[in-house]
Amino acid sequence: MGVEGGALLLGLLVALLALGAPLAVALGLAGAAVIAHQQLGIMALAVNTYTGIAKYPLIALPMFVLAGTLFERTGVALRLVRFASALVGARAGGLGIVAVLVCVVLGGISGSGPADAAAVAAVLIPGMRRQGYPPAYSAALIAAAGATAILIPPSLAFIVYSVLVPGATVTALFAAGLVPGLVTGLALLVPIVWLARRHGFGAAGAGDQEPPPPLWQSFREASWGLLAPVIILGGLRSGLFTPTEAAVVVVAYGLVVGFVVYRTLTLGRLWQALLDAGEISAVVMIIIAFASVFAHAGSTVGAFDALANGLLGLTDNETVMLVMITAVLLIAGMLLDAISIFLIFLPILIPIADRFDWDPVWFGVIITLNLAIGQFTPPVAVNLAVTTRIAGVSIEATTRWVLWMVAAALAALALMTAVPDLVLWLPRELGYVR
């Protein structure tokens, strides 16, 4: 039953995706068809759909999406860029360093790679163009830097992972993602700075070199944005609020900053932010809801166990298995967003992780880092699709630049995979994992 049901389930999913069906529709229809074919109780579909999203941690997801949308519209990204520029100063590759710094901080607010990349690209690319940075290089480095957002807490991907995987709490994943996110950002700086210095991007005499803004003034302007991640992480660590409550707190903070401090947020912009956040959240929730039907069908017919056992039958070497999983996830990350990949692949990967006794928090971070790299790896990558559109170049034009950044991120992935303590040290120190 497992092999036959699994072949039917995955075959239908692939066929529907190939026909251009939206992911949620493909997951729901494939799951419903297998449930009907195997006579597993078609009346349970409504319950499965509801229980897929009736989970407390998911309440945080639309709130963090709204928080990121609000801060994007209040001019926080522009002020963070000015402050980072004042810190870095005028030097070759300076704006590349600024892009990484700002993406890391914004990742601590939005939790979304594409949103992070879009906000930074809109602010930085015009200035980078004036200083002699090729648009393809600018688009590549901002797409790569923006990918750190799904590792830096509050990560939307971690919230979904915690719902799907027992033993991995949101707070533990948030703590575990911080060091890998920072290490990946540092790794990206190596090719970014080297390429800029080699080609003279942003050096004195290259284009219109703008003087850096005054440090203290830019810090004061950016301080309200810098406080947002501190509020989130500080509140979680102190026990003042849960991750879900943190999301609501940061939304309220964003409203105060937008309406009272910066006074850049109007009722019209607030309404548009609510619409955008509602649309993004609805898409994610619909995918999760119909993915639960797909997961119910797959687990009931034994498809996921059969696939996991098939992979385990290929090798019993832990390192080889990790390399195989990495290769599959990197390819999937080029095509789909992290949340969609979690919903499709986790039912197959979790039995493998259990077989090798991998820590679920460490495994979640490793998977997410894989998917972060996929977000800026050509030929199809969600972050690159955003930044190239803003820069006015094709994804193909970024290849000569972005492959250096992919190599740097893969080095960070290899380090986190080989030394799990780098991932688990902080959550252990904070008492979130044993």
Image (spheres, rainbow, N blue to C red):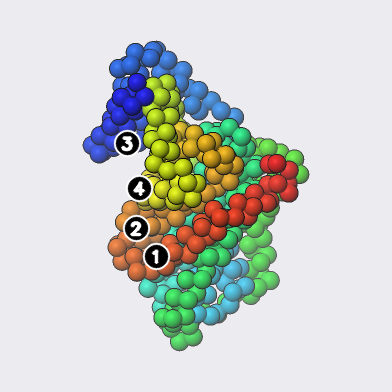
Which mark lies nearer to you, 1 or 3?
1
Residue flagged by tag 3: what amino acid is it?
A: Pro
Label 4: state its secondary structure: helix
* Residue occupied by mark 4: 335
* Residue occupied by mark 3: 22
Q: Are marks 2 and 1 in contact (CB under 8 Å)?
A: yes
* Residue occupied by mark 2: 378
Residue at 59% x, 55% y is: 419
Residue 424 seen in the current view = yes
Q: Nearer the viewer, residue 353 or 51?
A: 353
Residue at 56% x, 65% y is: 186
x and y percent of residue 193 in the render?
A: 50, 74
Label 3: how many Cα within 10 Å (few below 14, some 14–19, many 20+): few
x and y percent of residue 316 in the render?
A: 46, 42
Label 2: state its secondary structure: loop
Cα separation between marks 3 and 4: 13 Å
Residue at 61% x, 34% y is: 167
Q: Measured along the vertical axis of the image, is residue 186 above or below residue 74?
A: below
